[in-house]
Image: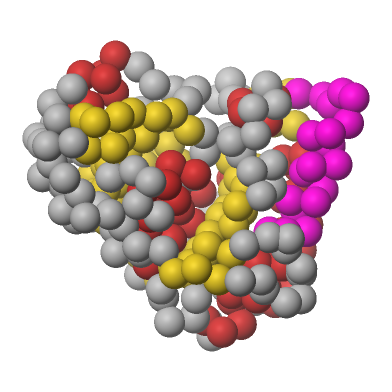
Amino acid sequence: MNYSDFVPVARRLALEAGDRIMEIYNSDDFDVKVKSDDSPVTEADEAADALISEGLRKAFPDVLLVTEEQAGSHTEKADTFLIVDPLDGTKEFVHRRGDFTVNIAYVENGVPTRGVVYAPAKERMFYTLADGSAVEEAGPFDKDTPGALSPIRVSEADNGALMVVASKSHRDQATDDYINKYAVKDSKSAGSSLKFCLVATGEADLYPRVGRTMEWDTAAGHAVLQGAGGKVVRFDDHSPLTYGKEGYANPFFIAYAPGVDLKPA
């Protein structure tokens, strides 16, 4: 994979998928179905998946592609692959809360090294450049020519006054119990992979996830956070969160700025 090829292709596909998602989001009504795992899926998920999959397969035909909406058909296993969540935060989409994202990532040897996260309703876009560093692009977003790019970097965390971000739709008592181990200045809720990006930009110091996620939910945000100097580790033993696991399922995890003094599970 040539990183210089990945970035413009993934960026363009994320923007095109975002346009299609917003057409449906702004329509009077849209159908919501329930998948076998009881999670919702909409025509926006399916349309964005088809668009991104076609574009990635055309651009990178020799790289394994894993997407949420085609998860049941994935029988191949690899340490290096492309992974996509065409609409992360479907619950936020259904309730028209805006905290949903398009996520495209490249995983190498179990590590997400490059990624694009686009939040079309929030008009925010984050991605890794060819050199691995992370940036936020300012809109309006032209598909051919990137706008102004601002390098992003994690905070210099103050362990006596941490900023914490947690899930908007999946926050529970176990999450609050863990957050309460820290000296917290402020806590905010956000949906989808935006939480990784808020840590990457220094808007938050810590994002613990005590709940079920899949690798396509996290890979792109993980790559962006890593490019901004952040880390993502398993909740249980603080070892690095890796990819290409059985069933593409994640354990609980913690995303954070390295200055945070992590507490045990």
Report the magenta residues as a range.
Answer: 14-32
- Where residue 98 appears, as percent x and y from the top left, is 65, 34
Q: Residue at x 20, y 49 (%)?
A: 157
Please tell me whether residue 6 is drawn above or below residue 51 in the rendered image: below
Residue 208 shown left or right of residue 258 in the figure: right
Using residue 237 as the reference point, say whether residue 201 is left or right of it: right
Which sits in the foreground, 248 or 213? 213
Horizontal side of residue 82 vs 23, given as left or right: left
- Indicate the position of residue 4 as horizontal and vertical percent values: 56, 84
Q: Is residue 47 visible?
A: no
Residue at the image position 37 percent from the left and 67 percent from the top:
227
Q: Main secondary structure of the magenta part?
A: helix
Front-most of residues 80 and 222 = 222
Q: Is residue 77 above or below residue 236?
A: below
Residue extending furthest toward the top: 173
Q: Is residue 164 magenta?
A: no
User: What is the total number of numbered labels drawn onto the structure image?
Assistant: 0
Q: Residue at x 28, y 45 (%)?
A: 205
Residue 23 colored magenta?
yes
Q: Quadrant of the C terminus?
A: top left
Q: Residue at the spot x=38%, y=46% of the render?
A: 203
Q: Is residue 189 left or right of residue 48?
A: left
